[in-house]
Image: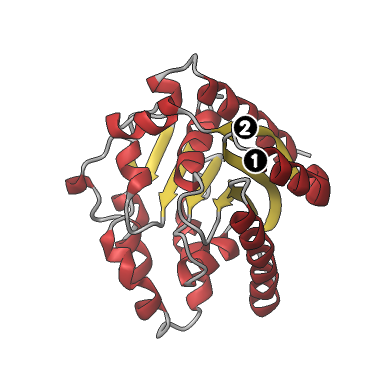
Amino acid sequence: MKIVAVVNNKGGVGKTTSAVNLAAGIAAGKKKVLLVDLDAQGSASLSLGLTRGDLSPGSAEVILEGHPIREAIRPSSVKGLDILPGSMALASADLVLSAVAGREVVLKDALTPIRGDYDFTVLDCPPSLGLLTVNALTAADFFIVPVTPDYLSLEGLVNLLDAVERIKKGIGKAAGLLGILLTLADYRLNVTEEIGQMIRGYYGRLVFKAEIRGNVRLKEAPSFGKTIFDYDNGSAGAEAYRQLTKEVLKRINK
């Protein structure tokens, strides 16, 4: 089982949208995929058709209370894609985990029993660099950073990657950077192309060729509990996530 974390400590960068649609894109290739929602908002879970009443037990109970993971996993609205839901119970994760021995590897240990059940697991991290994200980076083989092409996000990207390196040094082996994904790109703004070129110029091949542009259909899909592929398979957003999925699988399988 390959594990990919989608990480950014800044909200509003398309992190959850990317995690959900990447997981669905991989599942479309007849792979068995688990999406783990580590965000207290539970947006990834709701985006896949779950209701608020479906969110417990979920990742909070598994990570914080030792609940058996197989009992908390739910089937999603997408064939081949299961989900370990997130809920507001995750809001206390840092406080609870800080008192736990081996607090950086709780998620890694929790995933061990299901390693033979899935081909891929995608982790939707919270918008922070707290202990849940540290757990994700410890459990994952790779991580992806979605970033919007604007000055503040560029500065945040540099700081995020520096912070990840510090985390790696502190905990030893951790996920490797699989790639940087440009999201919410709006080329009506001059700054979009300028920052996009700066990111591609500095990080080179680490930046995925696929770009996720600002797209109405992508914004609408979660409110119907659907991925972009189920909501509008012919949209530009669906095509962008198909391209991203191909790139991700190619990099993983190198």
Q: Mark on residue 187?
A: 2
Left/right placement of residue 86 relative to residue 228 reads left
Residue at x 30% of width, y 41% of height: 46
Residue at x 47% of width, y 17% of height: 233
17 lies above or below 42: above
User: Where residue 60 sits: x, y (%)?
Assistant: 32, 62
State the residue in front, 170 or 13.
Answer: 13
Left/right placement of residue 24 relative to residue 48 reads right
Answer with the quarter of the image where residue 31 lies: top right
Secondary structure at badge 2 equals: loop
Amino acid type, residue under disc 1 in the picture: Thr
Kindly identify which residue carries mark 1. Answer: 192
Residue at the far top in the pictured view: 234
State the residue in front, 2 or 207.
Answer: 207
State the residue in front, 17 or 53.
Answer: 17
* Mark 1 vs 2, N-terminal side: 2
